[in-house]
Amino acid sequence: MSLALLCPGQGAQHAAMFERARPYPAAREVMAAASAVLGRDVVESAGADDRFDNAQAQPLLCAATLAQWQALREALPVPLLVAGYSIGELAAHAVAGSIDTAGCLQLAAQRARLMDEASPPDSGMQAVLGLTRDALQPLCAAHGAYIAIANGSDHFIVGGRRPALQALAAQAGALHAEIRPLPVHVPAHTPLLTDASSGFASALAQAGLTAPHLPLLAGIDARLVRDAAEAQHSLAAQLSRTIEWAQVMRQAFERGARVFLQLGPGTALARMVASAYPCCEVRAVEEFQHLDGAAAWVHRALERM
């Protein structure tokens, strides 16, 4: 089969993010586990004003992704591969069987705490569109900012302290780049979070990860994660290293993925794949009113490929 499952990162949380999955008993088990980790009802958390704060956002994203996966997994063919964007990479490991749902949610909470503790004050992230990497990298070096995620040839997420980001935005804007501030308050995937990487490596070493049961691509280099040691390394390293998402998409395509389904809230990953690979069939679960509609589409799309 040529199905690839994509697990999203932060930014698209909303109050109804669990509605499609709630009717399914397997999904409700995920939601109950997430409520225990969050210390309050997961649906209440999804609708709260603090849903973009790291401590809430990361368990929420994993829970929403895994609730949909557990509800859909019997209706979908075995995926060709799985990939995840930022915190989505941790959820992808749960989809691929490296860790169970409870362990994933607990690690998500630990990851958020370690990132918050390591983050310098007054930090954040912003999207920069319209500049190549060769043009953007000198601006980052000049202002003390960092490329956090490479989404495409002229689509990047940069992280750093707010003054650095503001200075970079002014200069990039003068070069006709588009700047979009993001609702994230830590400079994820930059060297500013090296301490978080070290702490998370220790947490992962104690979490009992196993080799993925499904092929899974690492965000830092798009390589196949083959064993528990590689899983631990890639999940820890991505907190302080650039995520090469464009390479992940390319590797998925080169490995034969032609049908892509984004789990979880939002449609950002689906839109990026659709733009880069118009020959592929690409949808997000949130484009469907019901999960059975998403499953039916996957089967029809695979038949067309």
Image (cartoon, rainbow, N blue to C red):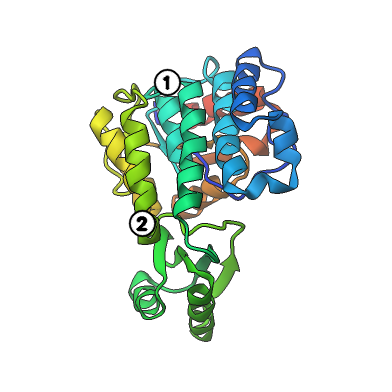
Q: Which quadrant would the N terminus be assigned to in this image?
A: top left
Residue found 69% across the figure and 36% down from its top: 17
Residue found 53% across the figure and 71% down from its top: 162
Q: Which quadrant would the C terminus be assigned to in this image?
A: top left
Sequence-first disc among 2 and 1: 1
Q: Which residue is mark 2?
A: 242
Q: Quadrant of residue 181?
A: bottom right
Q: Is residue 224 above or below residue 141?
A: above
Examine the rendering and report whether any part of residue 260 can be seen.
Answer: no
Residue found 39% across the figure and 61% down from its top: 192
Query: In the image, which is nearer the foreground, mark 2 or mark 1?
Result: 2
Examine the rendering and report whether any part of residue 121 can be seen.
Answer: yes
Q: In terms of depth relative to the viewer, which is nearer, 62 or 259?
A: 62
Q: Which residue is mark 1?
A: 78
Residue 154 badge: none
Instruction: Give the residue type that dot 2 points to.
Output: Thr
Q: Residues within 10 Å of mark 2 (few under 14, many from 20)?
A: many
**x and y percent of residue 203 in the render?**
37, 34
Q: Residues within 10 Å of mark 1 (few under 14, many from 20)?
A: few
Would residue 43 be found to the left or right of residue 268 on screen?
Answer: right
SS at badge 1: loop
Q: Quadrant of residue 34?
A: top right
**x and y percent of residue 110 in the render?**
47, 37
Q: In terms of depth relative to the viewer, which is nearer, 116 or 17?
A: 116
**x and y percent of residue 210 in the render?**
31, 23
Would residue 180 be found to the left or right of residue 193 on screen?
Answer: right
- Real-space CA distance between mark 2 and mark 1, rounded to the nearest whole angstrom: 29 Å
Instruction: Give the residue type that dot 1 points to.
Output: Val
Residue found 59% across the figure and 22% down from its top: 33
**x and y percent of residue 267 in the render?**
60, 45
